[in-house]
Amino acid sequence: MTDIAEAGAYALGDRTVRRMGYGAMQLAGPGVFGPPKDHAEALAVLREAVAQGVNHIDTSDFYGPRVTNQIIREALHPYPKELVIVTKLGAVRGADASWNPALSPADLTQGLHDNLRNLGVEAMEVVNLRVGGIHGPVEASLEPQFTALAELQQKGLIRHLGLSNVTSAQVAECRAIAPVVCVQNLYNVAQRGDDALIDELAGLGIAYVPFFPLGGFFPLQAETLSQVATDLGATPLQVALAWLLQRSPNILLIPGTSSRAHLAENLAAAALKLPADALAKLETLGAS
């Protein structure tokens, strides 16, 4: 059994989760649309992740749409008491698989109820407000949207609030409305634009959750990363994940996969310790 406890844990609101979690996006079909090619394997991946100690699962009702949430419910409901399921609101899918903004108070309310229904829960543990553009955050006020979520929180439908694809200024604006327990942005060993934000959030006790940990960066094409992995007897993906865990204690990982073999590889990264010389070599990727 892979001991993901070696990576430690961190607070997510009033819950504590292991820093190696699981992202459910890849459980849907191609383009995160439609059913998975192997439904049975999708169920098995979720059950194996929980069996290995994962207690933080990231999802959204617009994955599929509905597909990942319904698979999570089928695989894991009734949920273990220690499991924290995190969702996000702010988009809907078109019939053509397009991703369309859904940020009005009515849209957010409908999105929340869709998540509650398809996951089979009465309240969401954490809801992230997903905003910004395809290439990153867009500086704009989030007051109307975050206020709408805060009102749903006050009604008992959401326990904790988070943000996704946002800037430091937007985090500050939203924290003045209601507590923020996590921020989910693009970040990895080669795409380091959020370095200052991660440190700022760590000082505030707020979790940082990098999405698409490898983003548009393909580790097998990075000679430095590949060499470090070879030296350590690991895969480039494992090194990239281990680097994130060592970057800051407030970073929580949610790598996704639709296969148990890949899941085992991801979870094994929790026990990989990068020595000083490897970290020094990897720093050159962020500087390039």
Image: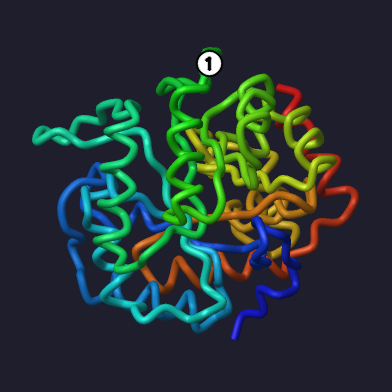
| In-image side of 212 versus 276 (left or right) | left
Residue sitting farthest toward the front: 155
The C terminus: image quadrant = top right
Relative image position of residue 24 (x, y in whole percent): 39, 58
**At x 70% / y 39%, what residue is drawn?**
224
Locate residue 111: give its quadrant: top left
Q: Is residue 73 left or right of residue 132?
A: left
Q: Residue furthest left?
A: 95
At 53% from the left edge and 34% from the top edge, which residue is drawn?
217
Observer-nearest of 39 and 222: 39
Q: Which residue is drawn at the image coordinates 52% and 22% (left, top)?
A: 143
Coloring basis for residues: rainbow
Element under disc 1 = loop
What is the crowding at mark 1: few (fewer than 14 residues within 10 Å), some, or many (at least 20)?
Answer: few
Residue that badge 1 annotates: 141
Residue drawn at x 28%, y 34% as measured from the top left: 107
- Frontmost residue, 16 versus 211: 16
Left or right: 61, with 162 as reference point: left
Above or below, 288 relative to 280: above
In the image, residue 145 sits, relative to residue 68, either above or below, namely above
Q: Percent x, y for residue 167?
A: 62, 23
* Total residue callouts: 1
Q: Amino acid at mark 1?
A: Ser
Which of the 4 image quadrants contains residue 284? top right
The picture places residue 68, in percent across and down from the top left corner, at 29, 59
Query: Can you say which quadrant of the picture contains the N terminus?
Result: bottom right
x, y (%) of residue 60? Answer: 35, 50
